[in-house]
Amino acid sequence: MPIKDPEKRKEAQRKAMAKKRESEKKVTVEKGEFVPTKNVYARGWDIIIYPESAPTNWLELLEETRMEIAISPLHDKDINPTTNEVKKAHYHVLIVAPGKKSFTQILEITKALNAPIPQVCKSTKGTLRYFTHKDNPEKYQYNPDDIQTLNGFDVKEILKPTASECMMLQREMIQFCIDYEICEYSDLISYALNNNHDWFEELARSSFMIMNFIKSRRHAMRNPVDPVTGEIYKSKLQEKESDS
């Protein structure tokens, strides 16, 4: 029976809306994990795959989704901070769909992979950086070259540094050359190749300033001039060459 009193009708409507909002916040439990009762839609989804429980063809199953996918290096050196034990080996996987996909749709994928329920990706770049623990120096640092991709996912494009980040990398390399008296471009390349992935990527993108700095520095080290007196004195480089 409809409520005739306007105030009571408004109060009933308020209670109904509040009850609806509350029900949307509730969760159910599936396999010990929280599952939202309200379907959620998003383009990006984070999932975790445990090799020991995933089907042997899990890569093929992901590829068959036809969605862009990035897969982290195998995380087999993560430490549980509470127990100080090594966590179970796992992969972090980022799925990016061409359009929004529902939680239910992505859940079907994780079920086929025997994986935990999917989570909405809050930041594509942030997820990719977490693949290697780039922003977590206290954790084991995985090799970014070990990131796998499927269906055309372009990791480098997403992780491409900003102009300010590029300038910071250039400053770091110049300071390194000063601190360690680097006077050959090949020495810096070799060091970056084996020790600093970000430097190597930056040198591949833009090396004009660094090359000219090293060239100028090499000339200055061979022909050092006191900026106050103008006197030419023997450089450290010359001392090394004479000793050898």
Image: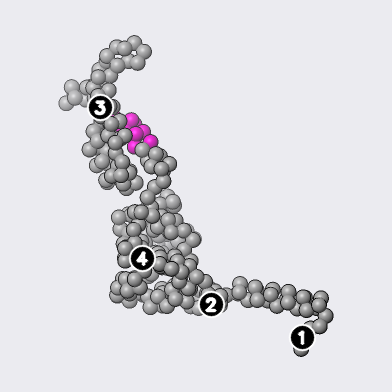
Q: Looking at the image, tell me whether mark 4 or mark 1 is earlier in sequence order.
A: 1
Q: Looking at the image, tell me whether mark 4 or mark 2 is earlier in sequence order.
A: 2
- What residue appears at the point 47 percent right and 63 percent down from the top-left corner? 121
Amino acid identity at mark 3: Arg
Q: Looking at the image, tell me whether mark 2 or mark 1 is earlier in sequence order.
A: 1
| Residue 236 coordinates in the image, percent (x, y) | 26, 23
Distance in Å between CA atoms under marks 4 and 2: 29 Å
Amino acid identity at mark 2: Val
In the picture, measured across the screen, residue 159 lies left or right of residue 208, that is: right
Badge 2 is on which residue?
29
Badge 3 is on which residue?
218
Q: Residues within 10 Å of mark 4 (few under 14, many from 20)?
A: some
The residue nearer to you, when weighing 133 against 97, is 97
Considering only vertical position in the picture, is 86 above or below 25?
above
Outermost residue toward the bottom? 1
Q: Give the image quarter of residue 152.
A: bottom left
Amino acid identity at mark 4: Glu
